[in-house]
Every structure is written in C-alpha cells, then in structure tokens.
C-alpha cells in the first residue's frame, strides 16, 4: 500500500501537468485578527446568557429536553422551551476539550481541529450541481462520486466530505448509506456524517467502525468521524438535529453546532445582535453535547451573514460577513473550543463575484482562526449549487492562502547579499547562481492562474479562469485512481448497506 | 459651488441606481499583520545597509551623485556608483516626516498619507486600455478622460490620477501637459505628477500652482501634489527619475520611491533577499530626497512580487507578493514613513483570476497598513492594461474592504435582546421593530454584485459580474458632471499648456 501510494504520487504531476501542493497539516503562524475588544466579547457573551436564561431555546426533541432538564435546565415541555441558568452554561462548556484529532482512513490524512490548525472541508449539502458543459441540474450519485474523486485529487482539501450535493436519483430515506460508501471509497480523508436524524448518524458511525475495525463501543476512544448540526434559527433546535447530536456525542465523535443567523432574516439586523443570537444557539447545542457525554468534542460553528434588504436574498462574503466571522472566532476562543467557518459566495456563476466574495470569506476564516473551514471547495449560488469549476478555482485560492501562511525564512543565505553583489545594476537575476539553485521550487506554482502574456494567452484560446478550470477537472478525473481499499472491508460495507436499506421506512 | 455640490450628490443615486459609498477618510482601526519578527526586520535592515555601504547604488544623474557626495556618500563618478555609510542613511531617514497631508482641488478630498490612513489610488501607467466592447487597444486622450471621469464617480478612490493609461494619440514629449489638464478638470482629487524627467514634474507643479493660486516658491508650505519614482532594479537610479525626485523634493512635495523587485528577475529569488534589495533601493531614493531638502515628505514604496520561473513572466497577487507586501509595511514603519503598496493581478481578462489575485493584493495592502494603495482601480494584465470593467469590479472590492474596516458597534441597542425576544423560535426578523428601524441602511449595498436568485438572474440575461460592470461604467459616464472649475483658472491652465508645448523639444 505504501509502495502504491508512492507510485501514484510520482505519477501525478507528470500525467496531467496540473501542479498541486502536497498534503500538509496547515498551521496558522499568525495571531488572529480581533475586531472586537475583550469587553465587547464579554458583552456579547453576557447578552447571550441572558437570551438563554430569560428567553430560552425551543427544543423540539423530547429526549433532548429531558436530558437538559435532568442536567438543571428549566423546561416548559408544553411550549418545548428550555431555559439555561448561566452557571449551567459555564459549567458544561468548561468540560469541552480545546482540540480533537480525527483519524482518517489514510492515517497520514488525519486532522486536528483546534489551536492554530486550519482544515479545509469541501462544499456539502447543495441541491444542485453545475459545470459549464452541462449547466445547472439536479445531481446524480455517479456525478457526486466524480466530485468526491476530484476532492481526493486536491490535497489542499483536508477533508473529503460525504455529500457535496444531493444524489437525487437515489431514494431519500436510504441515500445516506450510498453517500457514506462514496465518502469511504472515493477518497481516503475524514468526512462528516449526515445529521438528519439519529439513525443516519448511527449508520455513518457503524460504517466508520467497519472501516477502522472498531466495535461501536470503542468509538469514544477512537475519534473517526464528525457531524454538523444547524439550529433552526432563531432559537429552535429541531428533533432530527438533537437526535443526531446525541448519537455523535454519546459516541464521543465531534459535533459541530452551527446556527445560521442571517442578519435581518433569522437574526437581528445588527452584527452584535446576530452574534448574540448565534452565540446563544451555539452554546445551547454545545451544552447539550456535554450533557449527553461530559467532555464530548464540540466545535463552535459561526455562520452569520446578511440578507439583501431589498429582496430578502441571502448575501455572502460581505463586509458584515467578514466582521461576524472574525468576531465568531473570538467567541469560540472565549470558550476554548475549535471554530468552524465557511468559504461562501452568492454568485450565480463562477465569475469575478464568486471569486471576490470567496476571497473575502477565506481571508475572514483564516485571519479569524477558523479551524474547520467548511464549504471551502465548490460552493456556489449561496450554497444551492456545487460547481465543478468553482472547486478548481477554490483549490487555487486555498493553496495560495496555505502558501502565504508558510513563514518567510530570514538567514544569511536568503538575505542573498552575495547574489545582490553578483548582478550588475539594471541587470537581471535569471542566470544568477542563487537563482539557478532555487528556481524550480522557489515560488508557488498555480493550478489555474495563467501568467502568460496577452499574445500567448490569445494563441491558447483566450480562455478565462473558469474555462481553464473546466479543462482541469476533466484532466484530473482522467488520471484519478481510487485510494486502495481492503476487499474484505469493502465487502463488509456493501453487506451493511444491503442489510440496512430494507430496514429503513420510506419517507423518513 | 457648495449648493452645486449638494445638488449633484442628491441626484447621483437615483439617476443611475448604482449605489456607492460616500467620500470617507478611511482609517484602519486594526493593528497591522506582521509576518516578520522584529529581529527579522532588523536583519533585513542591516543587510540592506550592507548593500548600500559595500555594493552600492548606481546613480546615473550627475546632479544627484554630486548632491549625495556633498552629503557624505562615497561616489565613484566613473562607474556612477554611490555607496552610503550606514550612519548617513540613519541620519537622513530620521529627517523624513511620518505623515503628510496633500491638499486636493476640492478641499473636502484632501488626503493624509501616514499613520493608519488608507488611500486608494487608481491605476497609472499602462500602455493599453480595454473594455469588453472594443477589446484591448492603444488608448486615446478622449478615452483617458472618460476613465478619469469614472474615477471621479467613485468616492472610494481617494486620488484621481493623471494617467490611467497612455494617450498615444498625443505627442510623447508634451502629452504630460494634457494629462495634467485632464487630471485637474475631469476630477477634483489629488493626483500624481509624471516623474519622467524633471521638466515634466516641474510642469505638473506649475499647473498645480495655478489651480491653488500659489507662487511656485510657496509650494514647500503647500503640499498639493506628489509623484512616484521607480528605481531601475537592481540597484540603479535613472537620471529622469532622480531629476524629477529633485524637483519634487525641492518643492517639498511628497516623493514615493518604489523599487520594482520581482523575485528571480530584478531581485533574488528569496523574499528576504528581494526585501533586502527593495529596502536598499528605497532607502537610497528617500535619502536623496532628504539630501535635496531635509524634512521633504517621502513615501516608502514596496513592489516585490515573483516571476513565473517557467516563462519569466511577472506574477502578481501571489502568496510571495502577499508576504512581501506585509513585510514591506513593517520596514516602512521601521523608518516611520508612509507606505505605498498596490492592487495587482496578472490576468489577461476580467475573470475570477483577476478578482482573486486582486483580493490577495488588497488584503495584503490593507492588513500590511499600506497608506497609499496604488493601482487600486482598473489595473489588469500585470499593469499593461487599464480596464474599464476592472475599474468597476475594483471599486466594489475596495468598498467592501472599507466597510469591513468600520468598527462593530456593541451596545444595549445593537445587542438586540428585545428583538430576539420579539421573534418566535423558527420565525423571522423581516417585520421586527428592530429591523424596520434599520433595514434601509443596515448593510453594505453593492455596486456590481448580484444577489438575486438563479431564476431572476437568468431572466435578467445571465450576466457575469464583468458584463454587469460593462453596463455600470456606461451608466456612470452618462450621468457624469465635471466638478465645477473657475473659468479664470481654466483659462490660465490652457494658456500655460499653449505656451509650454512649443518650448519642449521633440523626442524627450
């Protein structure tokens, strides 16, 4: 297997000529950008504690309500309203670990959430898929597998995802099983369980146990998966979400709790107000995880943006989004838990807007010390579409950010006084000894950027970055090889799926 | 005149429906991002002092060489080589002021360089112009005036520029006079003098004296212009540049000194080495300005990027560029002088690449505390082209950054606990009292971003951001009104140009 991996790695670059960065545990060497003062963070923290204590969170699942009640929350079961005493919130949040490492099928691709680690996750959840050949359409399982294969091709994506878009050719009640199988076989990275109901989360974990040779009871000592729940903002936690959260927390697998707080729609129009609500909802979810299993790994999810007040349409990568993202990181660090952010945009096409809104998001996420940057590759149209071309453009933007974060080396050799002395005034360094020793690896080599002059670019067809991205993902799919898989595990996975499918009632 | 300005402002938004941010003295409330430690900055400083002392700078102008020699530099006139003692550099640099305010024709648009002030300057210098209707072409004076009119339409651009691209229909030796006239009449903002020879710099200052009602001798007490010189990297200062620098410094007008240090071409392949060389060259230019006039305002220009090592083509907005830009700010602050950066990209078309490379540049410039961000609006194709559509896209990106820098207000009102209490769980805030009171001005309103849903976007023609930008600049040109100008000043400017043109020999 090691020899197989090495062979593939050697073949990769020559076969397509698409340069890519190698796998790297990306660590941010810079301090986070802080847009709020410590006093302002404390004010938002206190306001969110007031929301939780005085106004409350509607928790639709009776099991979750009962668990919270037993742990000390004040519960009105009639109204399904849960109110949290501030001391309860503080005590349970103190149990959450600051960092968690998730083991991937390929151990070299295990990831750590927390500290200064940055993990780029691909897009997840859209209803549609698009590429510039076939346009925007409902996706199929086969296309979804192609998308996951491309995710495997880019080592800058630390996680592989399970569902970059919905495979609508499969039955809704059981397609999560097929998605898990695709996530396990198309790539060898970490991926997220579907959190739409406890049984889906459980199926994902069962299949991960097969992959890693674990008994289900061994899961809490073996972190191999994760899942993201969204609160139904404002102030509601749906039963499917709390059930899945409970399954994951019981198994000691990380739960990401992400309120979706659009200013002016699901949250107040002010950033401070939306952050207050985001914080209250995130705390409610993370506290529930601690109640289920003290010390369960949790991740603080921030997803605060604004709407277009003329149309109510969601906007992403906006100035408000950037500020809320950086401030969200400050709140997550206030509770010493990892922080999840996103790479977003609201464009309907892979154009300059898609790129500049994504860059605003990526810079916000990275400078705000997001540990898990969701939707990093392929998100388009406010999250309704997964785009093949956007995946390639995103990979470029993420790689550029990863290279930016590599520290500058300053020493006698790099200061290059001898090289400066060697080249005559007004001359050039192309032939300098210092240059020749370094030129092959000196600089970041782009995936899709074209730096050729106008005439050369014209001769090559005057292609935009999006048109070049279209060519690139097809080249990469041609060279793709599935990561090696033990046939016995593969068979066990297929057996599990075959057994489970008939057990699941239609329409759930 | 005041009434006239008010009337235009009131009319602007309704006439085109293109929302734009108002004029604002933009101040960065955040500390700079520092990619180098204090020790590393000191190492680069010391290395560049060694370059200046031991290797030297070739200064082609005999006047500049003699001035430097009289001030204590060691000069080899035969080889035109000037070597600077470190103490001479430190002493002269200590004379440079940390901040300078430049008065605009419209006093409300005066700008301050230094501290945390951010000033966005439009593109300057390309040989070509492009728009998506007429393609890439040599530009004319009439088109250049249209470009400057658009610059006037965007208050996010703090300066107006004099030459967004070369008006190649005018004779080379005297077209600087026409460019100055366009800069004075098409907009009412600060602009840069041409620094291609002392006589051009002098003409610009003479015309600025006419505008501001000054005698030339009064200039040092009245800062009304500025100019940028480039060293001819590596380690050479051309005569046209040192002559223009001398004219500006004598007149007490700010001189921006910008080495163009492309890693692997005009500088070593290492960032530390390129910064060492950039720093040496910038110091040489700024010291010359201090020698000409102690206390003359100077600006440290950083323009370090890398080439594509396969083709030698310049690359911009790269990871190396971002790091060098932020580190350059640290060096400028080491000398307590304002810092000039740029908004760059190497794309041949206004596409996703143009946007993401520009965003990398803008984030680098803003987080690195660039005070003067040159080429902010309209630069394309590595600076060979000024693009009408890129100008509009850039305006959007700059406005988003300016809005991001507005601090979050955290108080009882914005924390919005009452609004959170008012909206039922799972409900929405569209009708909430808190929302209604704020919705019209709550969020940033975009210039070119389209946040409509896919169906609406399709109905409107499925336009990319670049196609929408094409429509927008035409709309803005339709509504453009020249800023008011005293007819007597206008006549004096025309007289000056008429008198000067025949005096200038052809081919200079």
Image: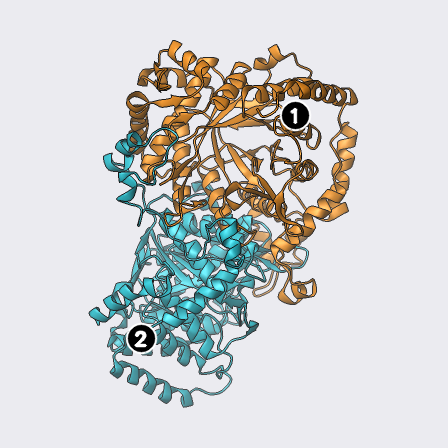
Chain colours: A orange, B cyan
Camera-side mark, 2 or 1: 1
Chain letter of the residue carrying label 1: A
| Mark 1 element type | helix
Q: Quadrant of residue A140?
A: top right
Quadrant placement of the N terminus of chain B: bottom left
Q: Is residue B428 above or below residue A48?
A: below
Q: Quadrant of residue A495?
A: top right
Any part of residue B57 in sight = no
Chain letter of the residue carrying label 2: B
Residue at screen point 73% across, 31% down: A483
Relative side of B368 to B418, left or right: right
Q: Is residue A425 above or below residue A80?
A: below
Nearest to the observer: residue B258 or residue B151: B151
Mark 1 packing: few (<14 Cα in 10 Å), some, or many (20+)? many
Any part of residue A68 in sight = yes
Q: Is residue A497 above or below residue B254?
A: above
Q: Picture coordinates of residue A281 (x, y %)?
A: 39, 27
| Mark 2 element type | helix
Q: Picture coordinates of residue A194 (x, y %)?
A: 57, 26
Nearest to the observer: residue A404 or residue A364: A364
Q: Picture coordinates of residue A310 (x, y %)?
A: 37, 50
Q: Is residue A5 above or below residue B66?
A: above
The residue where tag 2 is placed is B208
The residue where tag 1 is placed is A177
Relative side of A160 to B13, left or right: right
Nearest to the observer: residue A181 or residue B48: A181
Q: Quadrant of residue A478?
A: top right
């Amino acid at each position: 297997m090691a020899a197989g991996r090495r062979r593939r790695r050697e073949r990769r670059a020559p076969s397509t000529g698409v340069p890519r960065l190698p796998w790297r545990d990306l660590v941010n060497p810079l301090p986070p950008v802080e847009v709020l003062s410590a006093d302002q963070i404390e004010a938002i923290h206190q306001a969110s504690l007031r929301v939780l204590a005085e106004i409350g969170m509607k928790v639709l699942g009776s099991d979750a309500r009962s668990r919270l009640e037993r742990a000390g929350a004040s519960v009105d079961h009639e109204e399904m309203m849960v109110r949290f005493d501030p001391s309860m919130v503080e005590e349970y949040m103190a149990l959450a670990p600051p960092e968690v490492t998730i083991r991937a099928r390929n151990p070299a691709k295990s990831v750590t959430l927390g500290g200064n680690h940055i993990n780029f996750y691909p897009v997840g959840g859209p209803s549609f898929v698009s590429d510039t050949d076939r346009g925007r359409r409902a996706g199929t399982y086969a296309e979804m597998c192609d998308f996951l294969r491309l995710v495997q091709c880019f080592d800058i994506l630390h996680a592989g995802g399970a569902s970059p878009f919905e495979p609508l050719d499969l039955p809704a009640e059981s397609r999560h099983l097929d998605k898990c199988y695709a996530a396990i076989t198309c790539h060898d990275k970490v991926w997220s369980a579907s959190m739409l109901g406890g049984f889906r989360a459980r199926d994902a974990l069962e299949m991960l146990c097969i992959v890693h040779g674990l008994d289900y009871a061994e899961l809490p000592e073996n972190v191999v998966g994760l899942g993201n729940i969204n609160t139904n903002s404002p102030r509601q936690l749906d039963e499917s979400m709390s059930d899945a959260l409970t399954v994951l927390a019981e198994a000691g697998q990380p739960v990401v709790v992400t309120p979706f707080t659009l200013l002016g729609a699901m949250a107040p129009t002010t950033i401070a107000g939306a952050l207050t609500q985001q914080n209250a909802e995130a705390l409610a979810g993370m506290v529930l995880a601690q109640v289920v299993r003290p010390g369960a790994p949790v991740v603080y999810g921030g997803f605060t943006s604004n709407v277009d007040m003329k149309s109510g349409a969601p906007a992403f990568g906006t100035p408000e989004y950037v500020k809320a993202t950086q401030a969200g990181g400050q709140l997550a660090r206030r509770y010493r838990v990892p922080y999840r952010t996103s790479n977003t945009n609201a464009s309907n096409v892979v154009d300059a807007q898609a790129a500049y809104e994504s860059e605003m998001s990526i810079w916000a996420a990275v400078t705000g010390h997001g540990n898990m940057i969701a939707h990093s590759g392929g998100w388009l149209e406010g999250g309704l579409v997964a785009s093949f071309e956007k995946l390639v453009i995103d990979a470029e933007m993420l790689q550029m950010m990863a290279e930016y974060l590599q520290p500058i080396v300053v020493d006698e050799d790099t200061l290059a006084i001898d090289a400066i002395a060697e080249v005559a005034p007004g001359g050039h360094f192309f032939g300098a000894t210092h240059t020749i020793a370094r030129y092959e690896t000196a600089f970041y080599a782009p995936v899709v950027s074209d730096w050729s002059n106008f005439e050369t670019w014209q001769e090559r067809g005057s292609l935009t970055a999006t048109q070049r991205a279209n060519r690139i993902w097809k080249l990469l799919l041609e060279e793709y090889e599935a990561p090696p898989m033990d046939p016995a595990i593969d068979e066990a996975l297929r057996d599990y799926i075959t057994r489970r499918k008939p057990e699941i009632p239609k329409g759930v």
